[in-house]
Image (cartoon, rainbow, N blue to C red):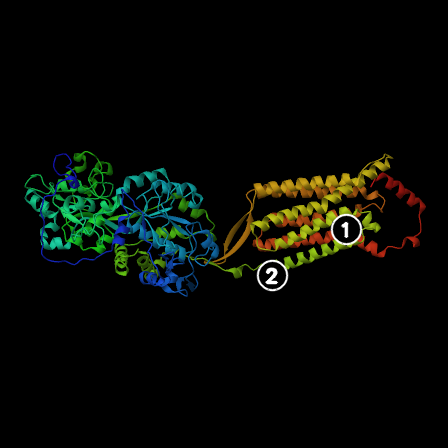
Amino acid sequence: MILEDTPFPTPYYQQPEVKMYHNHGHQHRWIDISTSVITLLGASSLLSFPSVSAALPCNSTVICESKYRKGSKCVNNVCSNPFESGCLRTVLGENATFAIDAKHTNRALPVKKRVCNSDDSADVISKGDVCIPSPLNFTEVRVAFGDWPSPQVLSWIIQIFLSEILQVPVSIDTGGEGGPQGSVSFYDPDNNFLYASSSYYYPGLEKANSVGDCRDVDLTTDSCFHYHPEVWPGQTAEVYQAVQEGYIEQPYLSGIVGSYDFYIPSYTVERDTTLSSYFGLQGEQHRRKLAETFLAPTTWGDYCKDVSSNNCTTDDDIAKRAPENQAEEAKYHDGENYDGHFRNTTQNDCDTNPKCTGHIIDTPCSWSTYTVQQLFQNNILLSSDGPEGNNRGYSYSAIVEIVRAAFATESDVMIVWYFPDPLLDQFDLIPVTFPRSTTLCEENRGTVAEKCSSNITIQRGNKEGSCGYIGTPLKKLFASEFGRKTEREPEASRSPAYKTLQDFKLSGMEMSEIFREWTLIDPEGDNREAVCTWVATNLNQLLRIVPPGYPRIVDPLLNDSDNLQYGAIGVASFIGVVVLITIALTNHWKEETPIKTAQINFLNLILLGYFFLSVGSILRGLDDTVGICIAEEWLEVLGFMLAFVPLLVKARAITVIDREARQYRRVTTTQETLYRIVAGIIGLTIIYLIVWSVVDTPTIVKTYALADERTVKSDISCGKAHALIFSSIRTGIEALIIVVTLVYAVEGRKVRQEFNESQTLAFLAYSHFIWGLLRNVAINVSFDASTQKFNAIISFIISGDTIFGLLIYFFPKFLNVLTKEPDNKRPVNFRKEKEKNLFRTWIRR
């Protein structure tokens, strides 16, 4: 940022160094922070976003347990995440409980394993030793991670609380254009970590609003999230536009009051207390003081090229070696290898440059800062000369490295920074006071477009907008469909996530507490330990926002249909055995007249149908799966058709023959013709079942009902998208077959009794009609019963239909076989024998 009406100066890293050093002669203490933590924080830049892996290399589990905690193991030379199966069980113990006041009782609930989410591998989910499925199948909530520390902390707190207390699956979105960059789940087995590729990616909220469930999105190409935990005031225009377009709700307060300030190290204030107020900064009389105090930070590459006497080929106490790649060249600090350096450039040299200025470390112009306007309008002769944007700011990572370099070398530096952030808890930075903020001032702040303008006059704005910063409540954003979808869900299975996130608030002091804990626990590691410790310590406080009636308790004792299911399976199994015995007896007596005249092949087809029905009845007694749902339909439909179509074909043939015989007309028919008719109808049935299986493939649907305010009884059933259509087709065809068979049976009642089964068929048709009616009433009439109980009832009905069919059609034939008189003792009626012989000639076998 330049305060004079002059062109932008040549960047300092292209300027010759003027030898000017400060020797302050005394030491100061500061809170140290490891390279890995700075790298972790520095990964977030609102202009550049390198990824970070927090994975800790190891060669033994002892190292992992010393760096993390017991439970971390050395796997493939990387320490595993000790919290993979849950934060609270790891910290509080596997037998830990928590209490929430219910309406009528105070129940202590166990801390369970976390629920699985879409970031978990299929292998992890199938094993079940790390996570469990959401008991009520809640829709997964996807949270934006952000590219700065506080939303990252908020995302992990939310993931822990929802996943482990309320049993709602939660995943984290790190996306921008091009989709998520990788897994940053709190439970990631390898402790992976990276910041999101965008600060505020509104298309991710828009996508969640359009699809509802982000698991339906290809997350390799699209970003999708329901909730952004922290939004700063600089996004006011964008948020307003999103609300107007309808894909987000009006924003809610996050609980944090965020603020920006100008900061300098405490040791700088000790050297010159006037620097802590704008009174000691403004005016021409302070130009030289600022220029000589606040020098330009120097990258590792520039130091070795322009400052080091030997290009860093030997250790000079500032750089141990030369940078090895472009990433290292761009660093302002690199732990043990490069402490950092601040140098005087022509921008700072007031002897050769009458318009000299001190150096300030400004943020990117897209942040909610107004540095150019504040400095120019208050006549403070400082300017930023970084590589980012028209305001010459610095990225997040660069600012963190510069602060670290300043404290490592005890150099004076002034930065523009925000609260809450770990930097303020890790280093002793003092805010610089500016004129008090007013409503008039806030209304005259520059917009993002003005702050990022290439025209320096536009960047400077007006005097009215030059005040200092004031704390501003930060907001959180919800995709509109998130709340709407929640309200549409049945009460028993309604997710508590939306209401919980509405009420969830974290103060800036609490966030700062987590940042301090991070530094104290392990400044060389990631902050999973700090976040988890805070959640465990403050669990009772968090439990206050749990909606009434949650967490739900799915009580298996309420699913009281087990005895009915076992009874249905037992009865169906008995019927199946009876059918098999009937098949054996039928084929044993196939040469006996009652069996022979009824056609043994037709009887076997009928019995095969009954056997299919009995197996289908057994499956009805089992809990539904996709395979069972399909098998039930096939067995029941094929069983009915095999049991009834041969009877229908046979009844029609006898009736037609009898009708033609009475007219003394010759009729020609064969068994092969009848078999072809049966085969054709069964073939059409199989085609119907194939079409049904493809078009309306069943899915397993879980439904729930409240037994009381908190307890839920569960139900599992076969879900079919076109159930009404195919059920109507099936019912109509079965009813038609029964009615037609009944008509033929009644019409054929005058056929000679030796060949006449009309009375038996009529009784059989009546029986099937009654049982079919009962079955359709049970299917179509709504009553309060679980799917298991309903299926057991249907199983009993099908078993009853089958056993009555056996009793009506087969038992009389067996009785005739057992009670018939021998042929040599039976009186012969020559007239009847003549008529039978004549009838046989009409039926060509």
Percent coordinates x, y for residue 601 in the rendering:
76, 46
Q: Vertically, is 196 above or below 555?
A: above
Q: Amino acid at mark 1?
A: Tyr
User: Which quadrant, please, contains the N terminus?
Assistant: top left
- The 10 Å Cα crowd at callout 1, few under 14, some 14 to 19, many 20 or more, is some
Asked where in the image residue 283 lies, by quadrant, the reply is top left
* Residue pictured at 47% horizontal, 50% vertical: 490
Give the labeled residue for mark 2: 563
Residue 434 visible in the snapshot = no
Q: How many marks?
A: 2
Q: Could you tell whether 810 is left or right of 91 in the image?
A: right
Q: Vertically, is 123 above or below 662?
A: below
Residue 121 visible in the snapshot = yes
Mark 1 / mark 2, whichever is N-terminal: 2
CA gap, disc 1 and disc 2: 32 Å
Percent coordinates x, y for residue 406 in the rendering:
17, 51
Percent coordinates x, y for residue 218 in the rendering:
42, 42
Give the labeled residue for mark 1: 809
- The 10 Å Cα crowd at callout 2, few under 14, some 14 to 19, many 20 or more, is few
Q: Amino acid at mark 2?
A: Asn
The one nearer the camera, 123 or 503, is 123
Q: Could you tell whether 736 is left or right of 372 in the image?
A: right
